[in-house]
Image (cartoon, grey):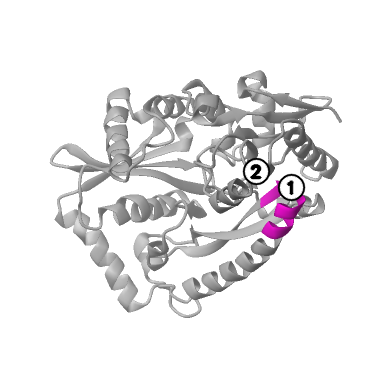
């Protein structure tokens, strides 16, 4: 099989790429990835150089992989800073490296895009091609971030190291309303959730849900100023710029949801979500100041409300955040797969990952014991 390396997603026909991605993962769609490049959020100067892989078939693409050469580890959410520091202390270069991921998006999704799901040969050819590209480019390693659980056996068969972690996801158990959902909580946790929700109302805040094409340029500027201001107060900037959000809301309007929190006829907070038919993905949040419990309401409770009303089955609000447990989110295993060129480092990291996985299992057990749900729910 002939594998082709592409230095821009624009070099690949959109219909061919999207034919492999389908509608399940909006952040892997050709439109999403191309806008990330066009707005220079993904670019060599930002440390993200596209190296997408494709295998041609008789009618379009047989297989493909989103892939980037990275000069840092920002925007990945699978943390390997300690590995990079160990390389540096040993007098070795950890960067550049190759990373297969949806840029700045810590959501599980397929990394091996196959026309036929059972095309094991195509999948293994993609993995082998990524490793060979790393060797040819003198990259230290290849990292597959947030692949699906079904892909893990393929990475294991290719000899990669498997890393285990967890996020917190909400699952729809056929709820008919938010009160129906809260009825599964213990009395104390249900009372606390209701108290959280009342605070926004008592502060005179109301909410609107808008699809991408319902947000005009002026409103996007307001939303982005809230998000960027919140990021700057934490000492950073959003990975995606304003031009990206304006573009993607027009390119993928049905996959974008913006929740606005409004008070006295002005927008005081906003959250940006992506969505597929079955899943809601929480991403960015910002406000013009502190409002009691507003973050929980805008980013979590409004999302749960939306999932129930629109029959979404899963709500993935992003990484980290043990505070999500008391609001009905449960620990969910996430994965990554890694190949390292240096054999001694690969052996050391393999031992480390075994120990880390045991800690992750223990952590998930402890966290799950703090669930707000009644026994048996």
Q: In the drawing, what numbered circle is on residue 92?
A: 2
In the picture provided, is 241 more to the left or to the right than 108?
left
Q: Is residue 377 magenta?
A: no
Q: Which residues are magenta?
A: 337-349
Quadrant of the rendered image containing residue 187: bottom left
**Which element type, helix, strand or loop, lies under badge 1?**
loop
Indicate whether 105 appears above or below 366.
above
In the picture provided, is 136 more to the left or to the right than 71?
right
Q: In the drawing, what numbered circle is on residue 7?
A: none
**Which element type, helix, strand or loop, lies under badge 2?**
loop
Q: Residue at x 66, y 45 (%)?
A: 144
Say if mark 2 contacts mark 1, CB within 8 Å. Answer: yes
Q: Position of residue 46 (x, y in %)?
A: 50, 29
Q: CA distance from mark 2 to mark 1?
A: 10 Å
> Nearest the camera: 279 or 119?
119
Q: Position of residue 125 (x, y in %)?
A: 82, 38
Quadrant of the rendered image containing residue 129: top right
> Nearest the camera: 222 or 171?
222
Q: Position of residue 292 (x, y in %)?
A: 21, 57
Q: Earlier in the sequence, mark 2 or mark 1?
A: 2
Q: Residue at x 15, y 37 (%)?
A: 265
Mark 2 or 1: in front is: 2
Residue placed furthest toward the bottom: 375
Residue 78 visible in the shown view: no
Other-residue count near label 1 (Cα within 10 Å), few / some / many at <14 / 14–19 / ≥20: few
Residue 367 visible in the shown view: yes
- The residue beneath circle 1 is 342
> Nearest the camera: 82 or 256?
82
Q: Position of residue 29 (x, y in %)?
A: 58, 32
Q: Residue at x 80, y 24 (%)?
A: 59
In the picture provided, is 132 more to the left or to the right than 253?
right
Q: Residue at x 29, y 53 (%)?
A: 295
């Amino acid at each position: 099989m002939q594998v082709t390396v592409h230095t821009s997603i624009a070099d690949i026909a959109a219909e061919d790429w999207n034919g492999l991605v389908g509608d399940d993962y909006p952040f892997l769609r050709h439109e999403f990835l191309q806008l990330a490049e066009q707005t220079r959020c993904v670019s060599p100067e930002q440390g993200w150089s596209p190296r997408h892989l494709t295998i041609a078939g008789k009618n379009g693409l047989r297989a493909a992989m989103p892939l980037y050469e990275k000069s840092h580890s920002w925007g990945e959410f699978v943390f390997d800073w300690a590995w990079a520091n160990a390389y540096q202390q040993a007098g070795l270069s950890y960067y550049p490296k190759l990373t297969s991921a949806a840029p700045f998006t810590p959501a599980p999704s397929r990394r091996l895009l196959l026309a036929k799901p059972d095309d094991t040969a195509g999948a293994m050819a993609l993995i082998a091609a990524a490793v060979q590209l790393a060797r040819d480019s003198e990259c230290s390693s290849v990292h597959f971030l947030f692949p699906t659980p079904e892909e893990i056996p393929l990475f294991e068969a290719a000899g990669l190291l498997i890393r285990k972690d967890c996020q917190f996801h909400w699952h729809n158990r056929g709820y008919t309303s938010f009160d129906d959902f809260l009825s599964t909580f213990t009395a104390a946790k249900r009372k606390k959730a209701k108290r959280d929700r009342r605070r926004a109302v008592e502060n005179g805040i109301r909410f609107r849900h808008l699809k991408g094409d319902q947000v005009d340029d002026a409103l996007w500027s307001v939303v982005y100023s809230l998000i960027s201001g919140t990021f700057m107060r934490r000492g950073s900037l959003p990975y995606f710029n304003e031009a990206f959000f304006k573009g993607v809301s027009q390119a993928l309007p049905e996959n974008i949801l913006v929740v606005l929190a409004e008070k006295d006829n002005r927008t005081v907070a906003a959250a940006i979500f992506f969505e597929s038919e079955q899943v809601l993905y929480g991403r960015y949040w910002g406000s013009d100041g502190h409002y009691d419990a507003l973050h929980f309401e805008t980013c979590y409770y409004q999302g749960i409300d939306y999932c129930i009303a629109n029959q979404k089955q899963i709500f993935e609000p992003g990484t980290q955040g043990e505070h999500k447990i008391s609001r009905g989110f449960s620990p969910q295993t996430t994965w990554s797969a890694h190949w390292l060129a240096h054999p001694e480092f690969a052996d050391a990291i393999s031992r480390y990952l075994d120990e880390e996985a045991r800690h992750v299992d223990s952590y998930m057990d402890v966290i799950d014991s703090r669930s707000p749900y009644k026994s048996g729910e």
